[in-house]
């Protein structure tokens, strides 16, 4: 029997407390050992909540020899630094998306992990929800695919939210826009390029607030993507084919109790298929544990192509600055 992976957490982020660590309680093969924060009170509160040790300072946690892997839920622009330090400390790493802010850094981090014989995983959970496999099975009912669209938008956050600090949180492209980009890669494959993009940027703080992206595949399939944090909530994808339209809602962050629905429209008739509930965070943690155990099927192709597409968006986008 393989010994459980001993996990440490760098930071007390909302996503860790709300989704990842509750899901961890349901996963065999990973034991939560410690959580670190620069604020000892935060570390102690998290540790009491999840039944582990509290550590003051991220370096102190990385120095512990009773931890095999770390989860990094820090703000986007801090990922690269702490991923690199964790790998240097001999830890496997599960890091929130994106791994870094640019392609060169992402490739370098993945190479560091390979050289150190350590696992580095970008924590997108929605690809591990069972509804995506079912969606792929049903795509043929829409006929030959002609276009794909996806949106992930949320209402404005409080003024002090880190997403409005591009040097820390990275803005809406890195925090939110990566979801529909990743969905396009998942369904259309890696051979996508940016045909055009528009970004709305806060004129004072220089943070990306929202945007639209047009991708194209080598087969001529177009992908129209929308993202942002100045909208009503939306998390959708839709496939338009020669024979019908297949669509789904609440696709990126459904709670474990949510039963997703796929809608197929053909010849004026609308059919809805309700799918089983699933815990995508728990599934991702099991996938990470399998990767650490050396089981096959854990590549980085989509991580690299996502970083490439983000770079293309930043280079090609028409930018509007708004007050």
Image (cartoon, rainbow, N blue to C red):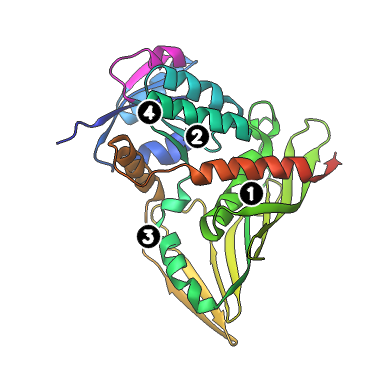
Q: Nearer the viewer, mark 1 or mark 4?
A: 4
Q: Which mark is residue 14?
A: 2
Query: Residue 120: within the magenta?
Result: no
Q: How many marks?
A: 4
| Percent position of residue 234, x then y | 61, 57
> Which one is earlier in the sequence, the residue at label 2 or at label 3?
2
- Secondary structure beneath label 1: loop
**SS class of the residue under badge 3?**
loop
Residue 267 appears in the picture as rendered = yes
* In the foreground, 256 or 186: 186
Closer to the N terminus: mark 2 or mark 1? 2
Return the disc, 1 or 4, that comes first in the chain's sequence. Answer: 4
Displayed quadrant of residue 36 = top left
Residues at marks 4 and 2, CA–CA distance in whole angstroms:
26 Å
**Foreground: 54 or 91?**
91
Q: Is residue 19 left or right of residue 104?
A: left
Whether 71 is drawn above or below 41: the answer is below
| Residue 73 visible, this angle | no
Q: Secondary structure at mark 2?
A: helix
């Amino acid at each position: 029997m393989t010994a459980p992976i001993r996990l440490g957490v760098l930071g007390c982020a909302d996503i860790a407390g709300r989704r990842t660590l509750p899901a961890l309680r349901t996963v065999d093969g990973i034991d939560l050992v410690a959580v670190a924060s620069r604020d000892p009170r935060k570390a102690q509160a998290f540790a009491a909540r999840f039944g582990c040790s509290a550590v003051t300072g991220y370096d102190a946690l990385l120095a512990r020899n009773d931890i095999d892997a770390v989860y990094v839920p820090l703000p986007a622009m801090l990922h690269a630094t702490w991923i690199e330090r964790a790998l240097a400390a001999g830890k496997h790493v599960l890091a929130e998306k994106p791994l870094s802010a640019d392609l060169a850094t992402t490739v370098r981090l993945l190479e560091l992990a390979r050289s150190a014989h350590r696992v580095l995983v970008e924590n997108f959970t929605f690809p591990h929800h069972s509804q995506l496999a079912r969606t792929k099975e049903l795509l043929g009912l829409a006929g030959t695919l002609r276009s794909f669209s996806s949106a992930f938008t949320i209402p404005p956050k409080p003024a002090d939210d880190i997403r409005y600090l591009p040097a820390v949180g990275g803005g809406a492209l890195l925090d939110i826009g990566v979801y529909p980009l990743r969905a396009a890669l998942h369904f259309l494959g890696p051979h996508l390029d940016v045909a055009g993009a528009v970004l709305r940027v806060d004129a004072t703080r220089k943070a990306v607030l929202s945007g639209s992206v047009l991708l194209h595949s080598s087969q001529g399939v177009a992908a129209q993507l929308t993202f942002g944090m100045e909208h009503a909530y939306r998390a959708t994808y839709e496939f338009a084919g020669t024979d019908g339209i297949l669509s789904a809602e609440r696709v990126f962050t459904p709670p474990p109790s949510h039963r997703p629905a796929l809608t197929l429209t053909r010849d004026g008739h609308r059919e809805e298929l309700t799918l089983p509930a699933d815990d995508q965070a728990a599934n991702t943690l099991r996938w990470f544990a399998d990767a650490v155990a050396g089981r096959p099927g854990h590549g980085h192709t989509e991580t690299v192509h996502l970083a490439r597409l983000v770079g293309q968006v930043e280079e090609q986008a028409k930018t509007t600055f708004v007050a």
